[in-house]
Amino acid sequence: MVKGWEWDDTLFLGSASYYQRGRLPYAPGLPDVLAENLMLDGRGRLIDVGCGPGTLALSLSHLFGDVVGVDPDSGMIAEARRRADEAGALGRTRWIRARAEELPAGLGTFTVATFGQSFHWMDRDAVASTVKGMLRTGGAFVHIADVKTETPSVDGLPHPVVPYSAVTSLTRQYLGPVRRAGRGLLLHGTPGDEAAVLTRAGFTGPQRHVVPGGQVWERTREDVAAWVFSLSSSAPHLFGGRRDAFEADLDRLLRDASPSGRFSERLPSTEVFVWRKPR
């Protein structure tokens, strides 16, 4: 678990409706990379743990016969179901409100378990052990995240870049300098070294794949505001009665940065680590 912090159900309270609009997508080649390297043929079972509004699970649903998304936030599960309905995918997807620590929850055996930038919120040793038991022999535990070590080029962008540093500074003026997380504070950040956790759990690997980013992505002022409210560290409820004032200050900041109301940036590359349950 995160040192000095305990999970509570307000971690992403109110963020679900902003998540899909505010977050940058994974690099567009991700489904193809997973299909090729996991030899997916449309018949296996996927469990996406910490599924949020179904971002990853829905993008991969055509590669499996059955998809289960699990998330502890009721708003995220409702949004995932809504999006699955819009995509015509309700028949092959299920959305379960539960913490990862409550698995296996009678959900059966899976071919692949994905964790899209969610594993760090969990009791990782316990969840890794449980998920290993839920995977068939040879099944894959797949950890997916943006590549954090690259700096995407700003050359040739059609609009100003998003002023992330200024937005973060403004947010801290309202919420304080220490990262918020639910009812608590992340004094020590979130943990890393997933490799040690998964090795302890008995997985083999990993195989690392990088899906190239760099594609130009355009954003509006409203998209950037959605990004702020999609974050656990600046979820809407954290602003309390100061939310209207914050939104007004944020709008002024973004108008100054781009009078047209449009921004551009390049998508980050996506990093995939595939761990296997030994045969």
Image: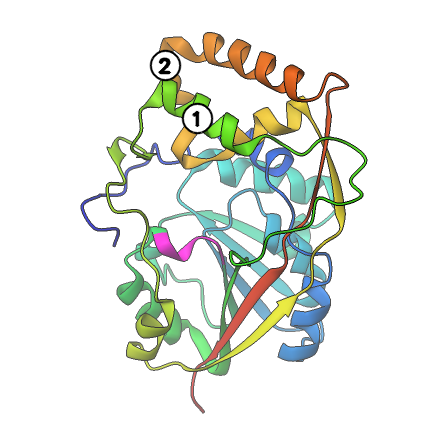
Closer mark to the observer between disc 1 and disc 2: 1
Q: Is residue 164 magenta?
A: no
Is residue 157 placed above or below 225 in the rendered structure? below
Q: Residue at x 68, y 55 (%)?
A: 59
Q: Which residues are magenta?
A: 116-120
Q: Nearer the viewer, residue 213 or 47?
A: 213
Q: Quadrant of residue 270?
A: bottom right
Q: Is residue 118 magenta?
A: yes
Image location of residue 95, percent across then percent down: 52, 48
Q: Does 239 appear above or below 207?
A: above
Q: Amino acid at mark 2?
A: Gly
Q: Crowding near pointer 1: few (<14 within 10 Å), some, many (20+)?
A: few
Q: Is residue 186 above or below residue 1?
A: above
Residue sitting at x 66%, y 45%: 84
| Left or right of residue 176: residue 137 | right
Residue at 21% x, 51% y is 3
- The image shows a total of numbered marks equal to 2
Q: Which residue is mark 1?
A: 169
Q: Secondary structure at mark 2?
A: helix
> In 3D space, how far apart are the residues under numbered discs 1 and 2 (Cα atoms)?
18 Å
Q: Which residue is mark 2?
A: 240
Residue 36 x %, y % = 70, 77
| Placement of 132 over or under 241, stated as above or below | below
